[in-house]
């Protein structure tokens, strides 16, 4: 999978988890040069609430935090680049506080978290990163003054408290996390958010041409979650007696698959019955462009 697709998925996933508890900013720029942080989060909820409702992710972000997620194992150059982002942001916040006649306290200094599917012992040692007894397996910290942590998703305990982070992993780690996600009660906090982001990722990858082996494997991994999300969304539309739920689902997937739709095409889709919307939600995965959609609609208007 291209890094851009995983970056967007991770940004939307993490910001959705964090938004109810503070200010979550996607692609936050730092001023020294054109640098972007995946997610910059400033909590407004209490540390206790964050830990209870978001598990390990909540424990990580009880202070202002930069979050950077990687599809492939993080490399030394990427760690150094993230360190530079952290230092740039610290300098920016320090200047701002000084201009306001204030002092940036330790509690307001940002913490950097890098989320990686795996990391070598050699690389950890080269940065002086070590596990800490009070934290879960798979969590490593660089020397204290740097305020940098690394999360290796393949080493995290397979418990609900780590689920949101393991969804950002890959291979069997992500597959197991997806199975756990689907098995959660329908009302479980953030379940629907995670399902939707994973389903959207599948449609985005499916729409690409010349898929590589990693992308084809990811589509297979994401297929169960896509089907689950689609089924639940359409079922919700039936249960509430509203066709609009199904229409919104299909329109969202079509835009990702074939691009923006004109008003006439949208009107035709909005007029479809729920059974036809279900049929279209299956067919659209094979569409290459808008012409395929127009042909499909024309065949059902006869």
Image: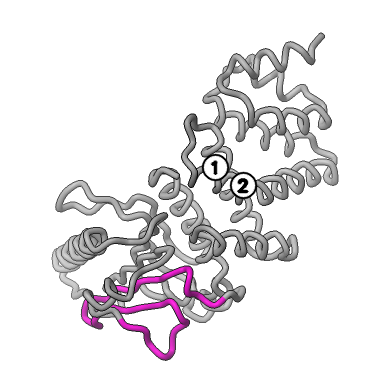
The label shown at residue 279 is none
Residue wearing tag 1: 216
> In this picture, is 68 found above or below 245?
below
Q: Could you tell me which quadrant the N terminus lies in?
A: top left
**In which quadrant of the rendered image does the C terminus lie?**
top right
The span picked out in magenta is 130-157
Give left or right: position of 156 versus 270. left
Pick whichever, 289 or 89, lies toward us: 289
Which quadrant of the figure has residue 117?
Answer: bottom left
**Residue drawn at the location 82% of the way across and 27% of the way down:** 273
Residue 100 visible: no
Colour setting: one colour
Q: Is residue 136 magenta?
A: yes
Task: Say whether marks 1 and 2 touch (CB < 8 Å).
Answer: yes
**What residue is rendered at 61% in x and 34% in y?**
253
Q: Residue 129: percent from the left, percent from the top?
A: 28, 79
Residue sitting farthest toward the front: 213
**Residue at left offset 80%, top offset 38%:** 242
Instruction: Tell me the element at label 2.
Output: helix
Could you tell me which residue is drawn at 65 percent across and 21 percent down? 266
Towards the viewer: 296 or 269? 296
Dot 1: what SS?
helix
Whether residue 37 is visible, yes or no, is yes
In the picture as drawn, the residue positioned furthest to the top comes out as 302
Please provide percent x and percent y for residue 69.
39, 59
Count of marks, rendered view: 2
Which residue occupies the foreground of this view, 44 or 243?
A: 243
Identify the disc placed on residue 220.
2
Above or below, 183 against 262 in this view is below
């Amino acid at each position: 999978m291209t890094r851009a697709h995983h970056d967007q998925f991770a940004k939307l996933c993490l910001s959705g988890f964090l938004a109810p508890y503070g200010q979550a900013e996607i692609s936050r720029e730092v001023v020294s040069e054109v640098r972007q942080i995946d997610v910059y989060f400033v909590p407004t909820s209490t540390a206790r609430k964050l830990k209870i409702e978001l598990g390990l992710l909540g424990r990580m972000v009880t202070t202002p935090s930069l979050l950077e997620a990687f599809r492939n194992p993080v490399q030394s150059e990427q760690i150094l680049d993230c360190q530079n982002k952290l230092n740039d942001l610290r300098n920016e916040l320090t200047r701002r506080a000084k201009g306001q006649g204030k002092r940036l306290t330790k509690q307001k200094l940002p913490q950097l978290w890098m989320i990686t599917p795996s990391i070598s012992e050699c690389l950890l040692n080269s940065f002086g990163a070590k596990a800490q007894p009070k934290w879960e397996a798979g969590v490593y910290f660089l020397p204290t003054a740097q305020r940098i942590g690394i999360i290796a998703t393949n080493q995290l305990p397979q418990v609900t408290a780590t689920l949101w982070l393991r969804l950002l992993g890959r291979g069997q780690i992500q597959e197991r996390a997806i199975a756990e996600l689907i098995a959660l009660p329908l009302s479980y906090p953030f379940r629907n958010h995670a399902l939707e982001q994973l389903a959207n990722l599948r449609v985005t990858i499916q729409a690409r041409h010349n898929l590589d082996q990693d992308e084809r494997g990811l589509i297979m991994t994401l297929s169960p979650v896509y089907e689950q999300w689609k089924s639940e969304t359409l079922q919700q539309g039936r249960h509430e007696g509203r066709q609009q739920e199904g229409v919104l689902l299909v329109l969202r997937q079509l835009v990702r698959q074939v691009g923006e739709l004109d008003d006439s095409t949208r009107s035709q889709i909005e007029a479809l019955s729920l059974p036809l919307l279900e049929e279209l939600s299956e067919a659209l995965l094979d569409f290459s462009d808008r012409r395929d959609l127009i042909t499909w609609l024309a065949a059902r208007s006869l």
